[in-house]
């Protein structure tokens, strides 16, 4: 049995898993990297190394893609009956649910997020998307068409799996991002090579065990741990891959696009954001304060849809900023495995320095700090929930995605909806937004005018497997979840027969 020195609060089974020798999952086998190389995994609450995982590189990518190619071209998965595929995905969901505590512990230990949140959000949402997609397997269907071409024809479409899919995911919701990608691809009958984020590989490696136990045929899912340049880049560029689905920064999204050009593989991208939360004077103020605070501070602001630009009508601006600052000051920042933790450390030293750098740049550019503004200790990657005022476009903190617990508040004075929409839409991103008002007409007009893939009214960060999620503008291409995500993993074939 492994010692619990990595953190005495985790269970023996999780400690055993973390300290076991980790392997890549290729062609249904657990294998070391071809080079034998490994890299360290850190606990962000302490900065200490907790384990090592294989460092996949081009040779491993080639092995994984070959396995996925074989599994697609001649294996059983795309040829299984739809209901059989659905049954296996449902079994995956059941197995994840059976290991709920372990997955929540892994997410907390590896990413830093509170265990209590991972247990009620990350893991249950992961289970949901597998069950939701299990249901879709039997409902993927084409159409028939009454065509007008002279003669007598029978025309219909088939929806077929796109083939071998490469998936590259980030570290903010390690398990859930894997599930958002894997569940629909598998429902459609694709085979997959997924590269986990180098900062947070543990829950994805545990998922490999679940797929194995669920009876997924070899090569259908291949799971790689490795760095972006070493493993992600050759995977995105691979000529035997039919499609790449990426979630991460807009900067890397553009690299993925270039890498995909070689064989014109299909691309979907879920990228960054700088989402506005707009509070109108008739909003329920307390509700709006709690809601907009949670919009930015949930998951430590490490959400691509974080409400990082707060626009408040001048009549209630002081009250709302004071309220959000108070909420920020009351959040318990502590290691994620501490049961009282409401916010854990940021994921990595790099992210920690980056977020602190943004706060410094905001202050340097004239922002006023009404809450937080610093690290909480010299131990671990903890940053205080931070509220900045006196900010305006042109400042880095306003224009760029920080991906940390930092919100920039700005008053607006105009009753003219077009004026506030212009400010809210003044960003290269278009992922999400929230509107806080009791006025139905304002709610609908603003929802319509926002250039964003998701608009929440009197709420923020509400996700469901049934709802499409994705970005306008530089926030991405395509949608995750809902019926729409199936388009990412299906080709449409038109068949016309002369009768
Ligand atoms: P973040 O900045 O939030 O860490 P990134 O966009 O850098 O997000 O990383 C998201 C994912 O993309 C990770 O799995 C990372 O390893 C991968 N990645 C980074 N650079 C590349 C690249 N050049 N090609 C392919 N994948 C990459």
Image: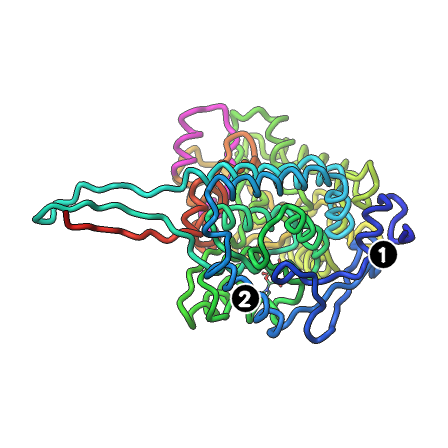
**Residue for point 83% across, 58% down:** 50
Q: How many residues crowd mark 2 within 10 Å: few (<14), some (14–19), many (20+)? A: many
Q: Is mark 1 within 8 Å of ligand 1?
A: no
Instruction: Indicate the position of residue 231 as horizontal and vertical percent values.
Output: 61, 69
Q: Which residue is mark 1?
A: 378
User: In which quarter of the view is residue 421 placed?
Assistant: top left
Closer to us: 113 or 218: 218
Q: Which mark is residue 65?
A: 2
Q: Which mark is residue 79?
A: none
Specify the segment rendered in magenta: 423-448
Please tell me whether residue 155 is drawn above or below residue 428 in the rendered image: above
Q: Is residue 425 magenta?
A: yes
* Residue 388 visible here: no
Instruction: Indicate the position of residue 439 as horizontal and vertical percent values.
Output: 45, 24
CA gap, disc 2 and disc 1 = 43 Å
Q: Does residue 239 appear to the left or right of 332 in the view shown?
A: left
Closer to us: 216 or 485: 216
């Amino acid at each position: 049995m492994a010692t619990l020195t990595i953190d005495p609060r985790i269970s023996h089974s999780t400690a055993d898993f973390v300290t076991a020798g980790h392997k890549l999952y290729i062609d249904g086998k657990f294998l070391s990297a071809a080079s034998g190389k490994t890299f360290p995994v850190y606990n962000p609450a302490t900065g200490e190394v907790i384990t090592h995982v294989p460092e996949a590189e081009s040779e491993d990518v080639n092995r994984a893609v070959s396995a996925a190619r074989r599994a697609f071209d001649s294996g059983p998965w795309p040829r299984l009956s739809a209901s059989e595929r659905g049954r296996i995905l449902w079994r995956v969901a059941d197995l994840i649910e059976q290991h709920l505590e372990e997955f929540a512990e892994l997410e907390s230990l590896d990413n830093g997020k509170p265990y209590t949140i991972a247990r009620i959000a990350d893991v249950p949402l992961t289970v949901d998307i597998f069950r939701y997609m299990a249901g879709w397997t039997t409902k993927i269907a084409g159409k028939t068409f009454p065509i007008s071409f002279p003669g007598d024809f029978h025309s219909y479409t088939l929806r077929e799996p796109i083939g071998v899919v490469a998936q590259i995911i980030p570290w903010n919701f390690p398990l859930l991002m894997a599930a958002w990608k894997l569940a629909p691809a598998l429902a459609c009958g694709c085979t997959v090579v997924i590269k986990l984020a180098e900062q947070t590989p543990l829950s994805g490696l545990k998922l490999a065990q679940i797929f194995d136990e669920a009876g997924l045929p070899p090569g259908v899912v291949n799971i790689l741990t490795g760095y972006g340049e070493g493993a992600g880049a050759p995977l995105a560029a691979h000529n035997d891959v039919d499609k790449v689905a990426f979630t991460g920064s807009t900067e890397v999204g553009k690299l993925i696009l270039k890498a995909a050009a070689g064989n014109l593989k299909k691309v979907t991208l879920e990228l960054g954001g700088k989402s506005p939360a707009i509070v109108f004077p008739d909003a329920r103020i307390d509700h709006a304060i709690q809601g907009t605070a949670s919009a930015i501070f949930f998951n430590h602001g490490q959400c691509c849809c974080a409400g990082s630009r707060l626009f408040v009508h001048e009549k209630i601006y002081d009250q709302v900023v004071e309220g959000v600052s108070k909420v920020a000051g009351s959040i318990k920042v502590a290691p994620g495995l501490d049961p009282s933790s409401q916010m854990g450390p940021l994921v990595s030293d790099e992210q920690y320095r980056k977020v602190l750098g943004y706060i410094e740049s905001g202050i340097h550019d004239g922002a006023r700090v009404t809450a937080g503004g610093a690290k909480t200790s010299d131990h671990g990657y903890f940053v205080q929930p931070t509220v900045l005022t006196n900010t305006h476009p042109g400042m880095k903190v306003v224009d760029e995605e920080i991906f940390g617990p930092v919100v920039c508040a700005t008053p607006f004075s105009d009753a003219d909806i077009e004026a506030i929409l212009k400010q809210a839409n003044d960003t290269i991103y278009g992922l999400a937004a929230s509107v806080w008002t009791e006025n139905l007409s304002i709610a609908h007009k603003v929802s319509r005018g926002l250039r964003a893939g998701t608009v929440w009214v009197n709420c923020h960060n509400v996700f469901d497997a049934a709802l499409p999620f994705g970005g306008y503008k530089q926030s991405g291409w395509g949608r995750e979840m809902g019926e729409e995500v199936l388009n990412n993993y299906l080709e449409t074939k038109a068949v016309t027969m002369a009768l």
